[in-house]
Image: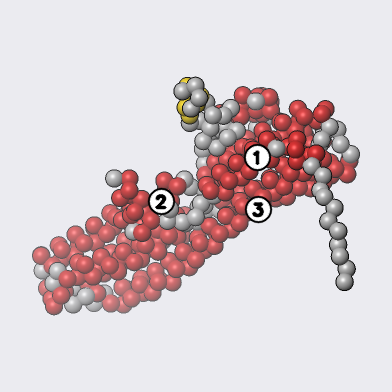
């Protein structure tokens, strides 16, 4: 059943949306009622003018809305990818400039934040961010069996159980601040406490500011909601279109053929409407998108794995010396 639902979401989105499916069923039912009751034989005034105006209006507004939604999806993906890239750059810079043993505890706390940054930001803009549900490793909440001991073990630690996570929880209890915003406060505070030169601190702070800049851009994109007046007008136009479309055909000649013809036309408009509503949000889960449009999930998983690799290899990376490559001039 899940495969069928995902197939509909991906290739036939109006059939997977309850409201659109309801309008399609209502349109077909309305057409059958008109034909069977011979309502078209009644003295009904000519509706070609209002129907033509509504058709032209929908034909202009819906593609415009779809184009804006696709653009918003792309902007969200671009900013999220830039955010993840800057977080990785911040991780690289942290292990290269903070090599002294006395910085190890603060570096560990910084990396605990870097690990969850992609996940926390995704959930912040998806809605429903709960820090207690975030693990340092993506999908760390899923226990896995140890092949050697045949014992089921937890794959990752919860963020709130780390020292910086506990500090975050305490600050959340005393401060009226967004949980994701508070993570940035901890990052800047920990950078300022590192035992490194001011020049290196400034370098880290500039990179952290780039991370926050991408985060702020995503907030601007996700925070915008179309005016309710526009949404109400669009829904009203779609309902009126469903009501009037049977009368745009020569019902006496086509009879029940108007059912499938009306279905196809309404399906086309509703498809554009669904794209305009759903595609804009790149932070939805893969279950919601059904693979029909791009979301940030893959970037989140890849970034989390990459930052863990950076931290696990931090000692060898920090002590590796680049070999001098001779440059030959001819």
Q: Earlier in the sequence, mark 1 or mark 2?
A: 2
Whole-percent x and y of residue 90?
73, 44
- Front residue of 171/189: it is 189
Residue highlighted by disc 3: 82
Where 221 sits versus 189, above or below?
below
Instruction: Quote the CA–CA distance across marks 1 and 2.
Output: 30 Å
**Compared with residue 241, is residue 192 higher up or lower down, i.e. above or below?**
above
- Compare marks 3 and 2 and give the one earlier in the sequence: 3
The residue identified by callout 1 is: 309
Q: Nearer the viewer, residue 245 or 119?
A: 119
272 vs 135, left or right, is left
- 25 relative to 35, above or below: above
Q: Are marks 1 and 2 in contact (CB under 8 Å)?
A: no
Q: CA distance from mark 1 to mark 3?
A: 19 Å
Which element is circle 3 on?
A: helix
Nearer to the camera, 173 or 248: 173
Position in image of residue 63 (x %, y %): 44, 68
Label 2: how many residues lie within 10 Å, few (<14), some (14-19) or many (20+)?
some
Res 208 seen here? no
- The residue pinned by badge 2 equals 290
Residue drawn at 75 percent across, 27 percent down: 105
Quarter of image, res 107: top right
């Amino acid at each position: 059943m899940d495969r069928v639902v995902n197939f509909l979401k991906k290739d036939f989105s109006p059939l997977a949306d309850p409201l659109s499916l309801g309008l399609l069923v209502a349109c077909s039912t309305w057409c059958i009622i008109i034909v069977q009751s011979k309502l078209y034989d009644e003295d009904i005034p000519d509706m070609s003018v209002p129907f033509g105006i509504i058709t032209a209006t929908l034909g202009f507004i819906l593609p415009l809305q779809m184009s804006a939604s696709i653009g918003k999806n792309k902007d969200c993906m671009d900013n999220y990818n830039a955010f993840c890239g800057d977080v990785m750059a911040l991780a690289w810079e942290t292990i290269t400039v903070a090599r002294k043993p006395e910085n190890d505890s603060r570096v560990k706390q910084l990396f605990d934040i870097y690990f969850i940054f992609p996940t926390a930001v995704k959930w912040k803009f998806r809605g429903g961010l709960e820090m207690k549900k975030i693990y340092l490793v993506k999908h760390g909440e899923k226990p896995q069996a140890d092949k050697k001991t045949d014992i089921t073990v937890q794959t990752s630690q919860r963020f709130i159980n780390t020292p910086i996570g506990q500090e975050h929880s305490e600050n959340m209890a005393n401060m009226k601040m967004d949980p994701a915003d508070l993570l940035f406060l901890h990052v800047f505070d920990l950078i300022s406490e590192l035992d490194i030169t001011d020049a290196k601190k400034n370098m880290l702070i500039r990179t952290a500011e780039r991370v926050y800049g991408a985060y702020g851009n995503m907030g601007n994109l996700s925070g915008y909601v179309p005016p309710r007046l526009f949404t109400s007008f669009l829904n009203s136009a779609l309902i009126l279109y469903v009501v009037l479309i049977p009368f745009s055909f020569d019902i006496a000649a086509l009879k029940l053929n108007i059912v499938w013809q009306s279905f196809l036309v309404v399906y086309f408009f509703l498809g554009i409407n669904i794209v305009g509503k759903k595609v804009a949000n790149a932070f939805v889960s893969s279950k919601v998108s059904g693979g029909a449009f791009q979301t940030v999930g893959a970037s989140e998983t890849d970034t989390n794995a990459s930052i863990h690799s950076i931290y696990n290899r931090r000692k060898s990376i920090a002590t590796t010396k680049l070999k001098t490559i001779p440059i030959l001039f001819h």
